[in-house]
Image: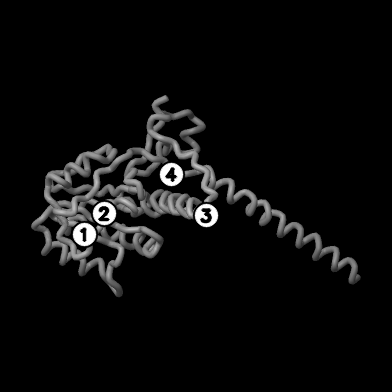
Amino acid sequence: MKLEKIKKRFILGILFFLPVIFLLFLYPSTHNYNTLDVVKENVLEISNQNQETSTFTQLEGKLTVLVFLGKQPMRKSIAALNLKELIYENFKGFKGFQIVVLIPNGTQSQIAELEKELITYEELEYWYFVFSSENEINNIYSSLLSNHDLDSNLATNNVFIIDKDRNQRGRLDDRTDNQLEKNAQVYGLNSYNCIEVSDIKNKMSEDLRILFTEYRQKRKGNFNSTSRRAEDLKK
């Protein structure tokens, strides 16, 4: 009886641990080769002269979520709250992470009102409101790859991921498995709509985690870059 019990436990142990071991072998190889695409290089840097924030911030050397709330930021409060709850709360404290909101000069009082809605129990340590000229906001936005223009208030619900080298990250091919099977036309993902909760909760969160994994592997010295460029897609 004892021998039979030992055999049963041994077999159950093998059945339990084999899938786990398989997944452990599979995990490193998956993340070594699925990097987040560079969709646009050389995003324009934020000018130091136009900043009125108490703490100067820039894009270079940081992993940035870049936001445009425009001349009437309170109208974009839902987008800002979604971003805070679903992205900022999950990634704050990650090395080099920041959210930068570019807004026109003259909106300081509205931003103070918006901050009251965003701040609950702690300050937004990695969240920066940068007041800038309309000209600079337009120039920075023009340096991004986007399918939409800023509206008349210099605002958009879409936010952008910028890496530490000021490259815009996203997906050159955002087709679903079903669309791939049907050989549907290729389309990319350059930005993330903060009104669409599924967009930021699923796609944006996933893409940020992939990018953080890339930087973690670079620090460890075992990063294997197979990141594609926009030119590759054209070919």
Residues at marks 3 and 4 touching, judged by CB atoms closer than 8 Å: no
Sequence order check, earlier mark of 1 and 4: 4
Question: 45 and 68: which one is in front?
Answer: 45
Horizontal side of residue 109 vs 63, given as left or right: left
Closer to the camera: disc 3 or disc 4?
A: 3
**Which structural element holds mark 3?**
helix
Q: Which mark is residue 36?
A: 4
Whole-number angstrom distance, CA of label 4 to CA of label 2: 22 Å
**Which structural element holds mark 4?**
loop
Sequence order check, earlier mark of 3 and 4: 4
Quadrant (top left/top right/bottom left/bottom right) for the C terminus: top left
Residues at marks 4 and 2 touching, judged by CB atoms closer than 8 Å: no
Q: Amino acid at mark 3?
A: Lys
Which residue sits furthest bottom? Answer: 121
Which residue is tagged 2? Answer: 58
Q: Amino acid at mark 4?
A: Leu
Quadrant (top left/top right/bottom left/bottom right) for the N terminus: bottom right
Q: How is the image coloured?
A: one colour
Which residue is tagged 1? Answer: 129
Sequence order check, earlier mark of 2 and 3: 2
Whole-number angstrom distance, CA of label 3 to CA of label 4: 18 Å
Q: Amino acid at mark 2?
A: Gln
Closer to the camera: disc 1 or disc 3?
A: 3
Q: Which mark is residue 220?
A: 3
Whole-number angstrom distance, CA of label 2 to CA of label 1: 12 Å
Residues at marks 2 and 1 touching, judged by CB atoms closer than 8 Å: no
Whole-number angstrom distance, CA of label 1 to CA of label 4: 26 Å
**Which structural element holds mark 1?**
strand
Q: Residue drawn at (19%, 50%), measured in percent from left and top?
A: 47
Q: Amino acid at mark 1?
A: Phe
